[in-house]
Image: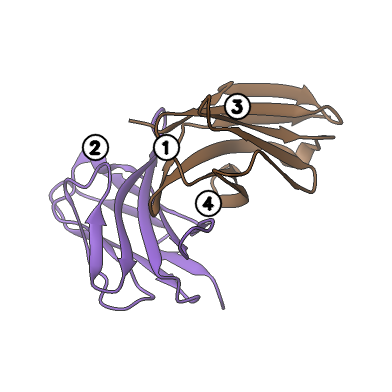
Amino acid sequence: DAGITQSPRYKITETGRQVTLMCHQTWSHSYMFWYRQDLGHGLRLIYYSAAADITDKGEVPDGYVVSRSKTENFPLTLESATRSQTSVYFCASSVQGAGYTFGSGTRLTVV
Amino acid sequence: SQQGEEDPQALSIQEGENATMNCSYKTSINNLQWYRQNSGRGLVHLILIRSNEREKHSGRLRVTLDTSKKSSSLLITASRAADTASYFCAAGGGNKLTFGTGTQLKVEL
């Protein structure tokens, strides 16, 4: 199916564990983004990518790692999860100068 | 820091009324976008207005942009219960968007 999919939908992990959130899009959009959404903060940009093998930091990149070896995939890794990383994570894709298409989100709880 | 800031934070209206939400931003932009988010779901793109445009329409939506005041407004006419959602403005500079904290709209029957 065409679209942008995130997995898992829900994840509970323990402090200190490594966690990878997956994002896959089928449009071959050049741009992909990771945001986190927290009450009182709206959406904050973690990392973004303009094309395969090109990534850049957003507003809140500390504690996160991204890669983009293929245009369609943009995984987000929490190297050592902390409670402050409990959040809802959204992946999005777009072409330059256009609106974003968002995934359904991953609700991550770090205990 | 948030580039876009919506006002009001919450808005409750009756079905059939119009809803107006405002957005202010801080720096120069290429475009400004509005998104809707239903509870527990991802954001959905509603409309994009470029920095050289002053007004844009899409169905029951009307967006205005005043670059001199660094502000935008979203008007939803003849609101419906299904319009109940959070609405976010997002300021586009370069290739990324900066989102505000949103306006929660509740449309009551």
- Determine the chain carrying the residue at label 2: A
Q: Which residue is mark 3?
A: B22
Same-subunit check for callouts 3 and 4: yes
Question: Can residue B42 be spotted in the picture?
Answer: yes
Q: Name the N-terminal-most of marks 1 and 4.
A: 1
Q: Are marks 2 and 3 in contact (CB under 8 Å)?
A: no
The image position of residue B24, as x and y in percent, is 50, 27
Q: Residue at x 70, y 27 (%)?
A: B20
Same-subunit check for callouts 1 and 4: yes
In the rendering, which numbered label is found on residue A84?
2
Tag 4: residue type?
Gly
Q: Which residue is mark 4?
A: B42
Q: Residues within 10 Å of mark 1 (few under 14, many from 20)?
A: some
Q: Residue at x 47, y 67 (%)?
A: A5
* B80 to the left or right of A85: right
CA distance for labels 1 and 3:
17 Å
Q: Residue at x 24, y 62 (%)?
A: A55
Q: How is the structure coloured here?
A: by chain
**Secondary structure at numbered mark 2:** helix
**Secondary structure at numbered mark 3:** strand
Same-subunit check for callouts 2 and 4: no
> Which image quadrant: the C terminus of chain A?
top left
Tag 2: residue type?
Ser
CA distance for labels 2 and 3:
31 Å
